[in-house]
Amino acid sequence: MEKGTGNEARERIINAAVELFSRKGYDATTVNDIAGAANVNKALIYYYFANKQDILDCMVDSILDEAVSGTLDFIQTNIVQMVKDGHLDILPDRLHFTDEEAINIFLQNSYKFYERVVDYVIAKKDIIRILVLESLKKGKHQNSLFRFVKFMSGNDENPIFKTISSADRDFVYSDEMVLFKFFFSIIPIVSFAAYFDDYKAVSSLDDDKLRSTFLRVYQIVTRSLISGSDILLKSNNPGK
């Protein structure tokens, strides 16, 4: 078998694993299967990865790293900068903007950021589908999807929290906000990626139409969180 060299061989191994995990399932895929599909010797797989689980962990780490990097870029160029310019005040329960123009600028930048996120998860939909399947099986990898939650912790080990709280110390992650972010922000986009091809088939929508419709719904949901010059981060009436 052709081994390949350097990163090229490693990428072939990962790509083969993605295809096999997605089609056959993680448990049903063997290292020999991956070696055959990647056209490499089995020994080369163990050169790059400790085992099959290590390959899956590498996929998860790659997605998390990209997600955090993109989010931090958005936070630095929008949230932090708007705080510095005096256009945004972060309160425990809301983002307060100085005027309508400021909130509209923030929303437009948020829409552009979310559009990039959607394009990224569509490109990575096979890997995301694997994570969803593993989570639902309640096997040893069931918590892979919940690794996103660690980036919603209120401590300095979380780079997202650290960056925002450094700009405005009033920022906190309430239990309500964490739950909302996970089940109403992360899970919807994960589900969209995982079921992208299936929904496209049953709806007869093409890629562009499905993508644009999802983005339009996101804008509607985001607009529903606006109250005057504020974007609400938690309910003012938790009992209702």
Image (cartoon, helix red, strand yellow):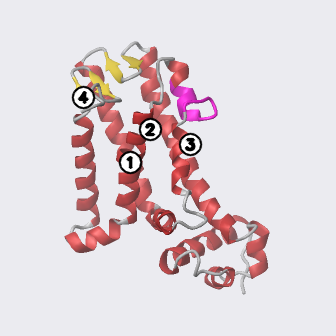
Residue under label 2? 178
Residue 104: x, y in percent? 26, 27
Task: Tell me, yes or no, whether the highlighted magenta stretch contains residue 155.
Answer: yes
Q: In which quarter of the image is the N terminus?
A: bottom right
Query: Which is more N-terminal, label 3 or label 4?
Result: 3
Query: Which is more N-terminal, label 2 or label 3?
Result: 3
Q: Which amino acid does label 4 sit on?
A: Ile
Q: What residue type is labelled 2?
A: Val
SS of the residue under disc 1? helix
How far separated are the C-alphas under marks 1 and 2?
Answer: 9 Å
User: Mark 4, mark 2: which one is toward the viewer?
Assistant: 2
Asked which quadrant contains residue 27, the reply is bottom right
Q: Quadrant of the C terminus?
A: top left
Q: What residue type is labelled 3?
A: Lys
How far separated are the C-alphas under marks 4 and 3?
Answer: 27 Å
User: Mark 1, mark 4: which one is toward the viewer?
Assistant: 1
Query: Which is more N-terminal, label 2 or label 4?
Result: 2
Task: Tell me, yes or no, whether the highlighted magenta stretch contains residue 202.
Answer: no
How far separated are the C-alphas under marks 3 and 2?
Answer: 10 Å
At x 63%, y 84%, the residue is: 33
SS of the residue under disc 2? helix
Residue 86: x, y in percent? 40, 12
Q: What residue type is labelled 1?
A: Phe
Mark 4: give few (<14), some (14-19) or many (20+) Cα within 10 Å.
Answer: some
Q: In the rendering, which numbered label is found on residue 226? A: 4
In the shown orientation, is residue 139 left or right of residue 107?
right
Residue under label 1? 183
Q: In the rendering, which numbered label is found on residue 150? A: 3
| Residue stretch in magenta | 154-164
